[in-house]
Amino acid sequence: MNTSKRENIIKKIADSYVEKELFSGIEWLAEKSGKTILSGKSGYQKFEDKTPIPNNAIYRIYSMTKPVTAVLALKLIEKGMLRLYDPVSAFIPSFENLKVLRLDGTTENISRPMNIEDLLTHRSGLTYDFLLGCHVAPLYSAQDISDDGSKNLEEKCESLSQLPLAYQPGERFNYSVSLDVLARIIEIVSGKDFHKILEEEIFEPLGMKDTGFGVREENTSRLMSTYGASNFKEIMNARPHELIETNVDDHNPHNKGDSFQRGGTGLFSTTQDYLSFARMLLTGKSQTGEIILSRNMINFMRINRIPKAQLPLMLGPLPLVGYGWNLAGRTVLDRGKLMSLTGENEFGWAGAASTYFWVDPDEDLVGLIMTQYLGSIWPINDDLRVAMYQAVE
């Protein structure tokens, strides 16, 4: 099968999603051994106006912020400024006397301190207010933990310290605001605002000039329209899948600029910018050869951290069968349990607006899928990833 036929398979899948009005605009990119092997676009920047997707379109990447924060933490660990076993309370004293809320409504003291590894692997006992079935989520929702952008990282952590944990630290994987707490710790140990140290240690060395917690006025014409849920609380609620534009920046903090900073969400980025970051996860180096993470730390980072007894990973009611979690995101653990084609040692993560990336060290491959629909149930990332793998020689 020649290259054009392989690319046409991917284009047809993406076009079908747009033609069915399930997504407005979709962009994809795959790079193997430093060379682009697949790239393309389908659909529109703004579906209502049929506006073409601009060059260097800007996307809200939500939880694809988390691996960026994780890499920054690992870089500080290499500098001797942090350790995986450091207790969170050593940096944020109000975390010393946390309580755990059990399903029967009783509370108990934490059995051991929450630590940095717990934050990186979502085994801290913290949670999210949108996680269906989590008994602590309603308490988060009542305080608008996810959507309140008026609090800085210090204030948010103080609010979290007053709420009970859903589980004992280390007891189970529970997707959460853990990376927001880690971002605050990074501020404390570095003595700098979170966005500033991100710029110095990650964005500038990797040439990620369009990535940040806001969009400059001169770049707003490149910002993609967003569809689906209008806030975090709604992203797992069943609703009609409609391409009705959401004024997401009016209802949550995701366009407040550098005044809004989080470790787990909030970044804006482009396909090319995030490619620079994802590419670095293969080698630890920027495209110009600057070392972001050492080769040994990259290999250490990739190892699954979740005990067998805590598998499969659960994202609310949704199981991630066949996957574990390393220090940067999900990682393939047992390909024989996966229901969709991917690499044996592939790892990466996704964002709430249906953005997605993966890194395959065996194939020396990086893949990216960008679109903007909050709370989609359609398997666009599986479909496009499978189509992109068939094009890899």
Image: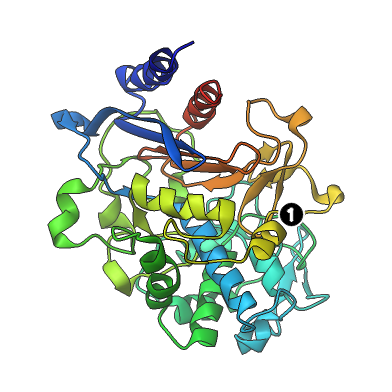
Nearest the eye: 149 or 369 = 369
| Neighbours of disc 1 within 10 Å: few (<14), some (14-19), many (20+) | some
Nearest the eye: 312 or 193 = 193
**What sort of colour scheme is used for the picture?**
rainbow
Nearest the eye: 368 or 349 = 368
Q: Residue at x 35, y 40 (%)?
A: 372
Q: Is residue 283 left or right of residue 107?
A: left
As displayed, is residue 113 above or below residue 129? below
Q: Is residue 381 left or right of residue 120?
A: left
Give the percent coordinates (x, y) of residue 393. Answer: 56, 24
- Residue picked out by circle 1: 303
* The quarter of the displayed image where residue 168 is located: bottom right
Q: How many numbered marks does the figure carry?
A: 1
As displayed, is residue 289 above or below residue 160? above
Callout 1, which amino acid? Ile
Q: Residue at x 45, y 64 (%)?
A: 144
Q: Residue at x 64, y 83 (%)?
A: 80
**Residue 310 can be seen, yes or no:** yes
Give the percent coordinates (x, y) of residue 353. Answer: 41, 43
- The residue furthest right is 309
Give the percent coordinates (x, y) of residue 67. Answer: 54, 58
Q: Secondary structure at mark 1?
A: loop
Q: Residue at x 34, y 19 (%)?
A: 15
Give the percent coordinates (x, y) of residue 149. Answer: 36, 68
